Image: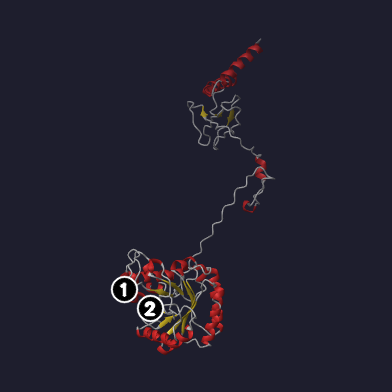
Amino acid sequence: MRTILQATFASALLAYAAAGPHFHYAHEKFHAGRRNRESNTPECGCTTTYTTYYGEPTLIQPGPQAPFVLPRPPPTSASSFTWSTSVASSSPLAYVAPKSTPIHLDPPKVAMPAAKPLEETASRPVENVALRPAPKLATNPDYVQAPKPSVIPTPQPVLKSNHLPAPKPLDQQKPQPPKPLVSTSGSHWCMTYSPYNADGTCKSSSSVASDVTAIAAKGFSSIRLYSTDCSGLQNVGNAAKANGLMLVLGVFISHSGIAGATAQLEEITSWAAGSWGGVQMIVVGNEAIFNGYCTASALADFISSAKSIFTKAGYTGPVTTTEPLNIMSENAHLLCHILDVAAANIHPFFNAAITADGAGEFVAKELALLESICPGLAVYNLETGWPSAGLPNGAAIPGPTEQAAAIESIKKIAGEKCAFFSFVDDLWKSKGEFGV
């Protein structure tokens, strides 16, 4: 019967102690009173360390060392937590929160890898992590290989030198215009000439000589020919030499195409006979692409062949072609690298916004545009002028007075780079646009 009562009392006491951490003080007082009654000794003044977990307290004899606190056992449930306090029998029981053992509330459950035993960790030799090879995911699933960082090149320092050249003045840094390969005489460089009568027949040598003398008297230094027909090389060449004029020769490409123009190469080289002193420039084709007589690619090949033939015959001057400016712009990639100088036929009248007195400024702007189309090449306007009769083209009005004003404007602003069209009205030609 007594055994049953003791068991019942013990169970009640156990339930009372496990009800919560707030009753640990009464539980300890029960055991302390029981020990004192059994031993008939006063309280020993020792330090008692205990936890909320049921069990006998541990008695630690006082000494100079700090009180020893047993390590906290792992919790048995998610709601368990621990206090560790020191109580002296000579003073009232008080709660002292330890500095090294804060109250632990369990965080949310997170799946973590199991920790390895302490002795295994302690006995592992120190490893140089920097030399460890990167783990492979296929053989070591415990590691996740980090992406390799992108390599950023280290900027190289700029070395300073005390011997750097002084910067050029601003005016010297600007691109300089190409030097002309053709010497001109002020505002009167060149006049175009065709040895034809009004009915299209060839002029006599005496008529040609008279015309060339008149051109020289106007102050021009050069004459431009379009082809070799009508004995132009012989008659114009002799008259030019007699008047101290230079020749701009032409290889004309007509509706017969390049095949019909190849004979002119032989005529020119035979006439020169190794003496090219009077030849200032050779122009292969005049608006041949514009008129549809050949393609730009075929013209470029023909110019290259002509240059080779002329060079073998002793000619060292420039070779070029001439087209309206828009044609030159469209085919610059095919033509510019073949040419020694860049040329175009620039007629201000065919721009409806240009008046006669603005012709010179228009020509100068078009020549500047030609420089940008074929950079590095000297540029020339091989055909320019103003009609003396015909129909108006917007602000461009034809007429003798307008013609004189336009010619004077061109001569004043760009005459040293222009061949004026023409010595007389080419009545042997059919009228073109606007009756000119």
Q: Which residue is mark 1?
A: 400
Q: Measuring from the top left, give residue 167's x and y in whole percent.
A: 41, 73
Name the quarter where the N terminus is drawn. top right
In-front residue for pair 321/76: 321
Q: Is residue 111 above or below residue 317?
A: above
In the image, what residue type sits under mark 2?
Val
Residue farthest to the right, as pictured? 139
Q: Are marks 2 and 1 in contact (CB under 8 Å)?
A: no
**In the image, is 112 to the left or to the right of 395?**
right
* SS at badge 1: helix
**In the image, is 401 to the left or to the right of 27?**
left
In-front residue for pair 11/2: 11
The reply to whether residue 182 is visible in this rendering is no
In the image, what residue type sits under mark 1?
Pro
Q: Which residue is mark 2?
A: 424
Of mark 2 and mark 1, the one earlier in the sequence is 1
Q: Measuring from the top left, give residue 131's x and y in whole percent.
A: 64, 54
